[in-house]
Amino acid sequence: MRCLWMLEEVGRPYQLVEKTTRADDLQTAEYMRLNPNARIPTLVDGDLVLWESMAINLYLAQKYDGPMHCADPKVLGLAAQWSFWAMLEIERLLLELLEHRVLLPEYSRDASVVERVELLLRKPLTVLNGALAGCGFLAGDAFTVADLNVAGILIELHHRRLIQGQGQALMLGAMRGGDGHHLGIGFIRHGTGRRRKSRGRHNQGQSQKKRTEGHHYSGPLLLDPLKP
């Protein structure tokens, strides 16, 4: 989802190809040539093929002009820092929470794992709170790919209600940012608003895909999970 959001922010036309997570969809010879990991998403932009969603978003921010363009090396460096940090410090824990709150059958879920992960999440959420104290954004004074990549993870925690208690309070504090208008509820409103827009663009993308069949397509091509 964060790659779709990023493409909407970039504002360039793109073609979306939806893939299921079934082996017979991702392990075809055609797809394995693009992504030997048999995972999604994958971006095809001209002769470049990229996988890993954070790398895709950082690439898009560097290549295309517009509000998300990282012309300043400082902004790009901070964006990379916060993107990698969010994956290592928050997203890996999010996946554990997701398993034991949602994905695993009831008899396989472990309440002690949930409790441990919620405790571990307090540290990175406190770090994020501190970074946003008195400021609304993570890399400068405007919304950048750094904010988008971190928000993409926080949105999952928020909407799936995966974290509770003190951890939830810390998360909401981080989302409010320094003045309550940016990375906080304002940030989430920004994010969910773009996601709604993205779904609308996605529908247009399906129409465009039909129109461009058999013709060369010059914009980015994103192979992304098929949403239920």
Image (spheres, rainbow, N blue to C red):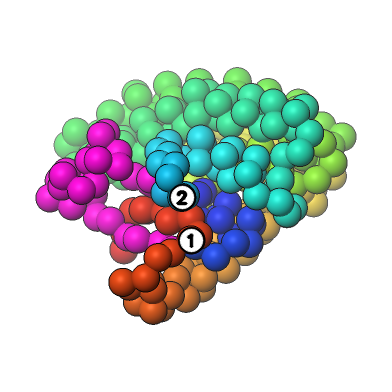
The answer to whether residue 204 is above or below residue 53 is below
Question: Which quadrant of the view contains residue 116?
Answer: top left
Q: Residue at x 51, y 35 (%)?
A: 55
Crowdedness near tag 2: few (<14), some (14–19) or many (≥20) residues, C-alpha within 10 Å: few
Report whether 210 appears left or right of 135: left
Residue 158: in sight, yes or no? no
The C terminus sits in image quarter:
bottom left
Report whether 40 appears left or right of 67: left
Asked if the residue under mark 2 is in contact with the one under mark 1, i.e. CB atoms within 8 Å, the reply is: yes
Q: Is residue 32 magenta?
A: yes
Q: Secondary structure at mark 2?
A: loop
Q: CA distance from mark 1 to mark 2?
A: 7 Å
Please provide percent x and percent y for residue 223.
36, 53
Residue in the foreground of this view, choosing between 37 and 226: 37
Residue in the foreground of this view, choosing between 193 and 73: 73
Q: Specify start and end residues of the magenta stretch as a single range.
A: 15-43
Q: Which mark is residue 218?
A: 1
| Earlier residue among tags 1 and 2 | 2
Q: Please name the amino acid that badge 2 sits on.
A: Gly
The answer to whether residue 160 is above or below residue 197 is above
Report whether 223 appears left or right of 36: right
Q: Residue at x 43, y 45 (%)?
A: 47
Q: Secondary structure at mark 1?
A: loop
Please provide percent x and percent y for residue 23.
15, 46
Q: Please name the amino acid that badge 1 sits on.
A: Ser
Please provide percent x and percent y for residue 141.
84, 41
Q: Residue at x 43, y 75 (%)?
A: 208
Circle 2 residue: 46
